[in-house]
Amino acid sequence: MERSIAPSCVNSTPSGVNSKDIPLTDYSARDKPWDEHRSQAQDVMMIYDRAEQFERYAERISHCSGVLRFGQVIDQETGEIGLKLREAQFCRVRNCPVCQWRRSLMWQARFYQALPRLEKEHPKARWIFLTLTVPNCPVNELRATLQEMGKGWQRLTQRKEFKPVLGFIRTTEVTAEKKRPGYAHPHFHALLLVPPSWFNGKNYINHAQWLELWRSCMRDDSIMSVDVRTVKSLNKDDPKTGLQRAAAETLKYSVKPDDMINNPDWFLAMTEQVHKLRFMATGGVLKDVLRQDEESDQDLIIGDDVAEQPDDGARLAFSWRPSDRRYRRFERGDKAAD
């Protein structure tokens, strides 16, 4: 049996306003990103709908996260009642902005879950954040470029200089070149776990050596830059802040939503070029940390908050309104308490 749940538990209904018209952000300001990402998804859907070969993507995105159902939970520190996402359905189209966002949060959550074990097994290990680039390419040559980059990475992992690395997470990002329309800037981000001996003596690789090493592995002397940084804390009171920033950069979106929306022709060509290419590789002690082949709706719901917070089973529903690009109350979608 379904019933309507009063919003007063979270925020009181504004005077003279029908509860079915109240935006999600009036209930929970922290859930504003839902409006932002779903609005971007609507733009991407319309671009895909222009191209016959991608109409299936447009159809799937049109139904993505159409209804969100939240439970009401009590913050154990403040005692305040807030919303926690409990039910949603996702399209899992690679370039859907909503799914990219939730996937990034899911991977980050899994990474942080694995940290205590990694720190226990490798208490003195350190982290390195590495960005590897190649010359920008026409977007219609992107597939071949990414395949060559994949081969270059494989060669890199087999080199003696890389052998001390305990584990790695490597992701692919593709951005649109600003100066030349129709060009792409593909690059790898990698998070490396290395032993403390890496920074002492013969194991250490400086910036110039990384550049020569990547050039050699890519067999391309025209590569002009790499970026390598030791992950350091930015806050002495929270030693993990540096690692959190590096993990967020490594595990973020593979294509910026703004690049998709502002360059529709580039985006359609890019989509065709990357079809069925894998954008992530893991190895060593980090090989199974992200479980990238496990991606259910529930996995994407948990996303950035893996802590168990019980509720009474009642669900407040919000539906996406394409006309004004906001989530608003959807009382007919509410569910009663268990």
Image (cartoon, rainbow, N blue to C red):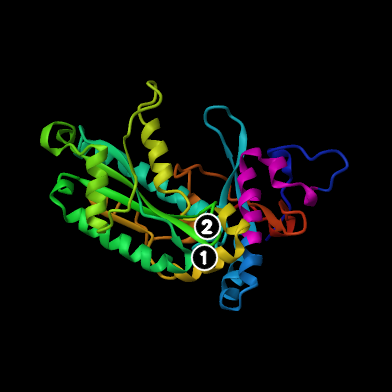
Task: Judge from the rendering whether residue 183 lies leftward or rightward of residue 10; answer left or right.
Answer: left
Q: Residue at x 74, y 45 (%)?
A: 6
Q: Residue at x 27, y 45 (%)?
A: 211
- Amino acid on which the number 2 mark rests in the picture: Cys
- Amino acid on which the number 1 mark rests in the picture: Val
Q: Residue at x 62, y 58 (%)?
A: 261
Q: Is residue 302 visible?
A: yes
Q: Secondary structure at mark 1?
A: loop
* Image x and y of residue 159, in percent: 16, 52
Q: Is residue 285 visible?
A: no
Pointer 2: what residue? 99
Residue 325: name its quadrant.
bottom right
Mark closest to the chain's N terminus, 1 or 2: 1
Mark 2, other Cα within 10 Å: few <14 / some 14–19 / many ≥20: many
Q: Residue at x 17, y 56 (%)?
A: 158
Residue 28 counted in the magenta span:
yes
What span is in magenta?
19-43
* Image x and y of residue 13, in percent: 79, 40
- Camera-side residue of 191 and 162: 162
What's the distance in space between the residues labelled 1 and 2, CA to CA? 7 Å
Question: Where 228 sits versus 214, above or below?
Answer: above
Question: Where 75 sits versus 143, above or below?
Answer: above
Residue 39: name its quadrant.
bottom right
Q: Secondary structure at mark 2?
A: helix
Task: Judge from the rendering whether residue 10 lies leftward or rightward of residue 182; answer left or right.
Answer: right
Question: Where 320 sits versus 225, above or below?
Answer: below
Pointer 1: what residue? 93
Residue lying farthest to the top in this orientation: 236
Residue 118 counted in the magenta span:
no
Cβ atoms under marks 1 and 2 closer than 8 Å = yes
* Image x and y of residue 27, in percent: 69, 41
Q: Which mark is residue 150?
A: none
